[in-house]
Amino acid sequence: MPRRSSPKPTRVILVRHGQTTTTGSILPGRAPDLHLADKGTRQADAVAARLARLKKVSAVYASPLERTRETAAPISAALHLRTRTRRGLLECDFGGWTGRKLADLTKLPEWRTVQSTPSVFRFPGGESFSEMQSRIVAEIDALVVRHPGQTIVAVSHADPIKAAVAHYSGIHLDLFQRIVISPCSVTPLILGAGSPIVLAVNSTGDDLTTLVPS
């Protein structure tokens, strides 16, 4: 009986979109027409320059929202690829909290649940954190199957990336708020061959060519 070959690992590089005019003050969610601020554009150019040092990147994916596609654009240009959109990379659906000021939301009694036990919280009229995590993990896993042994870039949002990191690190979702994902930070994973490997989280200045399994 022929011996089955082991699956080849895929390197998935998760990138958060660049800064917008509402970053840190408003919960924008999936609201349309939110674009990168000037600083966010500079951040996108900088992360594109970092990613351009990598060899043989096979694909660039992004959530359909404007801020992620604008972040992905210089990355795709630097790698001579086109950006492909995937709904599984979307921001969490914050429902009735969409567009509200964070200063107001932090005063709500539900905010404590969002921070301490997010696994049991559902945004009014929107997604639960558990659904968000299941969605982005399913999307990433599907991309790994599509790109065995390759390197791909996926531009998404802070909370989905945090939830993905928690999943692949074996951390309970209730602890995912302890993870920080800054604008245009890079979080590379090795997936598809044995246990997941988290090479880095929230990387904002390292030479990405040095991020390999030891």
Image (cartoon, helix red, strand yellow):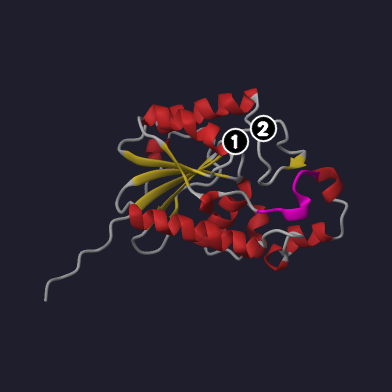
The amino acid type, in three-letter code, at marker 1 is Arg
- Which residue corresponds to mark 1? 67
Q: Is residue 214 visible?
A: no
- Which x, y percent locates residue 168? 49, 60
* Residue 73 shown in magenta: no
- Which x, y percent locates residue 67? 59, 35
- Which x, y percent locates residue 54? 36, 35
| Residue under the point 51% across and 25% down | 45
Local crowd at mark 2 within 10 Å, few (<14), some, or many (≥20)? some
Total numbered labels placed on residues in the image: 2
Q: Are marks 2 and 1 in contact (CB under 8 Å)?
A: yes
Q: Is residue 130 visible?
A: yes
Residue 15, numbered circle: none
Q: Is residue 131 left or right of residue 51?
A: right
Local crowd at mark 1 within 10 Å, few (<14), some, or many (≥20)? many
Which one is nearer the viewer's eye here, 174 or 33? 33
Label 1: which secondary element:
helix
The amino acid type, in three-letter code, at marker 2 is Thr
- Which x, y percent locates residue 176? 63, 57
- Which residue corresponds to mark 2? 20
Q: Quadrant of residue 113?
A: bottom right
Residue located farthest toward the bottom when viewing the structure as drawn:
1
Q: CA distance from mark 2 to mark 1?
A: 8 Å
Q: Is residue 109 left or right of residue 166?
A: right
Q: Quadrant of residue 181?
A: top right
Please state the extent of the stretch shown in magenta in the rendering: 93-101
Which one is nearer the viewer's eye here, 22 or 13? 22
| Residue under the point 61% across and 66% down | 172
Residue located farthest toward the left when viewing the structure as drawn:
1
Q: Is residue 187 above or below residue 51?
A: below
Q: Quadrant of residue 56?
A: top left
**Upstream in the sequence, badge 2 or badge 1?**
2
